[in-house]
Amino acid sequence: MSTSDAVQVSAVPSVAERRSWLPMVGLFLAQVLMSFNVAALPVSLGGMVEDFGVPPTVVSSTIVVYGLVVAALVMTGAKLGQRVGWVKMFRVVVATFAASAVLMIVSPTVGWAIAGQAVAGASAAIIVPSLVALIAENYRGEQQATAVGSLGSARAISGVSAFFIGGALGTAVGWRPVFGIVLVLAVAVFAFSFTLRSDGGNPGVRIDFVASIIIGAAIVLLTLGFNNLNSWGVFYASPGAPFSLGGLSPAPVFVLAGIVLGQTFFWWTRRRTAAGRVPLVDLAVLARPSERAAVYAMFIVVALEAALNFTVPLYIQIVQGRTPFDTALAMMPFNLTVFVTATLVVRFYKRYPPRVIGVFGFTLTTVALVWLSFVVTNNWETLPTILGLFVFGVGQGALVTLVFNVLVTSAPKSLAGDVGSIRGTTQNLASAVGTAIAGALLVTILSFNIGRAVVDHVELPTSLVAQVDLDNVNFISNDDLRSTLEQTDATPAQVTAAVAVNEDARLHTLRLGLLVLAGVSATAILPASRLPKYRQAEIPDPDPNR
């Protein structure tokens, strides 16, 4: 046992006072509010394109803007909460989130919608750390662990409900009423905020604007770089790149610049702390190896979730040409399992230490991804596929709650906002990286599969391949391919062969991509093995005076 673990086990806290769950209802709904808004955006894209008369790429800026603003401002938002007071700031930003929903509902142009999501992102940048801080101030011990777990389940259930409710409203009425639900949620959260208790703000807290600019720029560059690896080019600039640097794609340049700025941020923060000045984020929350391991594990598990959420809908909607509702049904075993597991896993904290649960969780996600890579077919309703998604959901739900709980319980109440800002930054960056890496990985694998399949199918002459651009490295639906072939001199046999190449190559790409993700999951067992050894009952109160 390490020295840090020995210190933690040496003290056993007294039984914590049990408090009403009513404040937690408001915090749970606040997480639902943010997650539902994010999940509603892709569901609403089709309606917004038709309503505003602009290309999908322009409308998708609403998603990009929201994520960028949250990630860039979350650390600054944490310091604002500490300075002004968490409850006061929470109420203000919930009100501004409600205003963003109104902007979405009445927006006459896509510019208004983008502005609405910018306001929502700025609000979420403060709500994210405030959830952690308010849980720390209102709950302790087992109740705190349960409250943390509920945030993970709220994210899962929001995604499911947004797909179903948003899809139904979008089909029957239009996309705007979906954000009417966001408005109602914001009003409910504001009402519940009056049940929260919190210490007053500390006017002595100073915001390090230099660090804020550095980390904001780093996050923006990293997010833009990773998100555009496919469209701008992984190495060489593609025709879709906004510019090139001597033929080099700006995407990897942005990633490299973001990494450099990230390192600069840590250097600046340590320098400011050594000088006795208040940093933008207190790195003391990452002082122990177990806490750093929790952040690494959180990054990997969120990236894996984002990769799966990108990969499966990509195949179902693009290759198979099925609807978002079909995607929601296919992902239902995963989302529901994450929802249930994230809530129930806290019951195991008394019996098993985080290290055991973490290793077991990543073992489950690894086994599930390997299993899916072998059993996945064009039919997502088969029992083996459902079983694989179920097992992955168990591991995912347990891990998301676990690593977050390790950070919250190891930090004193005064640093809860810093924990929240680290959580928000890690999750947003991991989501962008997971999605981008999955896309780049699948396209790279697909390029090899298509080239080999075209060579193997002798009934597809070179002239036909040139006409339909069959070896173009992209994901196209079978229906679109058939429509294209109808405009050529292809015979029925050649049409059948071309569709087979399209479907088989992309299914093999999906399977190999899942296998690679399994390898990433397996490597995460190492940081998970460095999580704390103590059980829930052995955790000392890091802030006994609260």
Image (cartoon, rainbow, N blue to C red):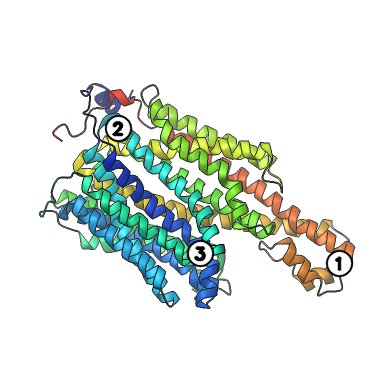
> x, y percentage for residue 109?
44, 77
- Left or right: where 166 falls relative to 543: right
Q: Which residue is mark 3?
A: 44
Name which of mark 1 and mark 3 comes first in the sequence.
Answer: 3
> x, y percentage for residue 120?
35, 62
Name which of mark 2 and mark 3 comes first in the sequence.
Answer: 3
Q: Residue at the location (16% across, 55% down)?
A: 84
Q: Which circle marks residue 178 in the picture?
A: none
Determine whether the residue tagged by mark 3 lies in a helix, strand or loop.
helix
Q: Mark 2 and 1 residues: CB-CB less than 8 Å, in contact?
A: no
Q: Residue at the location (36% across, 26% down)?
A: 533
Question: Mark 3 packing: few (<14 Cα in 10 Å), some, or many (20+)?
Answer: many
In the displayed structure, 344 sits above or below 14; it is below
Q: Mark 2 and 3 residues: CB-CB less than 8 Å, in contact?
A: no
Q: Residue at the location (27% across, 60% down)?
A: 95
Q: Which residue is mark 2?
A: 143
- Left or right: where 324 falls relative to 283: right
Q: Which residue is mark 1?
A: 461
- Left or right: where 537 falls relative to 515: left
Residue furthest to the left: 204
* Residue 518 in sight from this viewpoint: yes
- The image quadrant of residue 37 is bottom left
Quadrant holding the N terminus = top left
Question: Mark 2 packing: few (<14 Cα in 10 Å), some, or many (20+)?
Answer: some
Of badges 2 and 1, nearer the viewer stands 2
Spatial CA distance of label 1 from label 3 is: 41 Å
Q: Mark 1 and 3 residues: CB-CB less than 8 Å, in contact?
A: no
Amino acid type of the residue tagged 3 in the rendering: Ser
Amino acid type of the residue tagged 1 in the rendering: Pro
Spatial CA distance of label 2 from label 3 is: 37 Å
Quadrant holding the C terminus = top left
